[in-house]
Structures are given as C-alpha cells and as structure tokens.
Amino acid sequence: MHPLMMGSLNWIEYQQRLQDEGLVVLLPCGALEQHGPHLPLGTDALLSAAVSQSVAEQVSGIVAPVFSYGYKSQPKSGGGQKFPGTTSLDGNSLIQLVRDVVRELARQGATQIVLMNGHYENQWFLTEGIDLAIRDSATASQLRVMRLEYWDFLTPDILDRVFPDGFPGFALEHAAVIETSLMAYYHPDLVRLELIPDIAAAEFPPYDMFPQPSDWVHASGVLSSAKSASREKGELMANHIADGIATAIKQEFKVSEKNQLEKQVS
Ligand code: ZN
Ligand code: MN
C-alpha cells in the first residue's frame, strides 16, 4: 500500500483520508505524445505524476491516477499529430473527462483539488472541465480547484542556471532540456541520452495552419536540442518545482500541519 497513491488505497483508507479537511487531491494530466527518439511517449504523463508525488509528500496529499491521454499535439509546442504513437483526445472528450472526475472527487468529499498539467495543449480544456465541474457540483461552495503547468514554477534564477547561454523560451522546450533533465532525474531508465538529436532550434511563422503542415517540424520530432540536459539539472528543477507548488498550495488551501504519512509512522 502506497499511502500517497489513490489507486493503491482501499475505500476505507480513502474515506479516512477524506476526514482530514486539510487533504489535497492531486490530479496529474499528461498525454501520449512523441518526445523525440530519446524520451518515451508517456513523458508528459510520467512527469506530471512524478511532480504530483513529490508535492504530495510535502502537503497532506493524495495523487489520483494520471490522465494518460491529452489534447491534440500542435506542431509549435509538441511536434503535431503526424508521429506514430501521438494518440490524442478531441477537446470535448478531455473537457468531459476532467468534468466527470473533478465532480466525482468532490461528490465524495474532496474540497481541495489540484490539476497538475504536464502537456501544454491541455490547458484550456482542463480549465473548461473544472469550470463545468464546479457548476455541476452540489458542494460547489466548498470546492476549490487549482490548475497549473508545473514548468511555470521555474524562476529566472533557476532558468539561468539550467540555460547558461540564455533560455530559448518554453515553446521550444518540447522533448528538450527541461523535460529530458527531469526524466533523467525521475526515470533515468527511460532516457536514451545517446539518441538526443543535435539540431538547431525550430523556427515557426506567427500563425498556425490546418491541416497541420508536415514539414514544420524536424523529422526527429524535437523542436530544440536536449544536448545540454543532465540529471543534475533535473534534480535542481524537480526540487525547485515541487517546493514552489507546495508553497502555492499552502497559500491557497488549508493544509494539515503534519501530513498523513508522517502521522502513520510517528
Ligand atoms: Zn512533453
Ligand atoms: Mn506535450
């Protein structure tokens, strides 16, 4: 039994955790999307789940099972839909998934819910799902939901250390230095550093085209090179991100003094 993972608890244990009014339920949101030759298709789901676990250890948190599919990959942020394995939901499907799960968690008594997004294209569909869930909920007056992209917790001082030659911006960071370093820290066995493509950063026009053009993205699926990624950078960012999110949760939510995990061992 892993006390942080909702899917590992039985209903009686979960019911006990719901008695704690400082409980925070974290809902990681990922995607099944190509991440170049060096990272697995599940990268966004794996990272949002890993960050959720790190945060859950710092607050009185439980991590709900991750959303393994996300909204359609876009060329300028995820390489687009043309790569085998990039398996995506229509926007309406993702909205309904979020709406149903948030409403269900609330119906059982969760009042503090965090949607931890790890896939850029998800964000407005998560927002809509949360909004509809609150509108649906009989307990809406007690329900509070936080939605975030974990990389927004990287502050300029950390980005300066990770990108000594200058930060190219989050848009080109798909399968690049941030995600590769975080994967090297959380899931080193799933990273193949020797396969990182050494390519120039992609350049895109200031508009989108539909159907998605097939020649905007490098054949590797990567938007900028992850050559300077490292496990050390991953550890630095992972700790900073988890601390920043835990601080935000403590600021916005009522969080128990000691988390349930500590109570159980003490
Ligand atoms: Zn990603
Ligand atoms: Mn993504």
Image (spheres, rainbow, N blue to C red):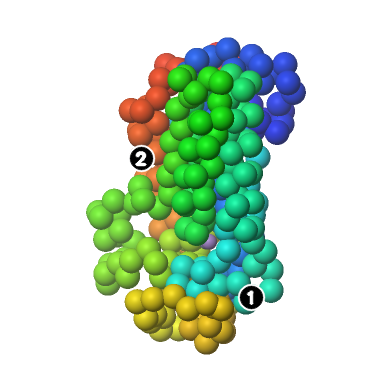
Query: In the image, is residue 101 above or below residue 266?
Result: below
Sequence order check, earlier mark of 1 and 2:
1
Q: Tell me if residue 173 can be seen.
A: yes
Residue under numbered circle 1 = 83
Residue with the most extreme right position: 10
Residue at image position (56%, 30%) is 136
Which class describes the residues within 10 Å of circle 1: few (<14), some (14-19), or many (20+)? some
Q: Are marks 1 and 2 in contact (CB under 8 Å)?
A: no
Residue under numbered circle 2 = 244
- How far is the residue under mark 1 from the one under mark 2? 34 Å
Amino acid at dot 1: Phe
**Is residue 66 shown left or right of residue 242?**
right
Q: Tell me if residue 232 can be seen.
A: no
Image quarter in which the N terminus is found: top right
Occupied quadrant, residue 233: bottom left
Residue 91, horizontal then vertical, whole percent? 58, 55
Image quarter in which the C terminus is found: top right
Residue 77, horizontal then vertical, whole percent? 46, 68
Query: In the image, is residue 209 above or below residue 127?
Result: below
Residue with the most extreme front position: 135
Residue at image position (36%, 51%) is 152
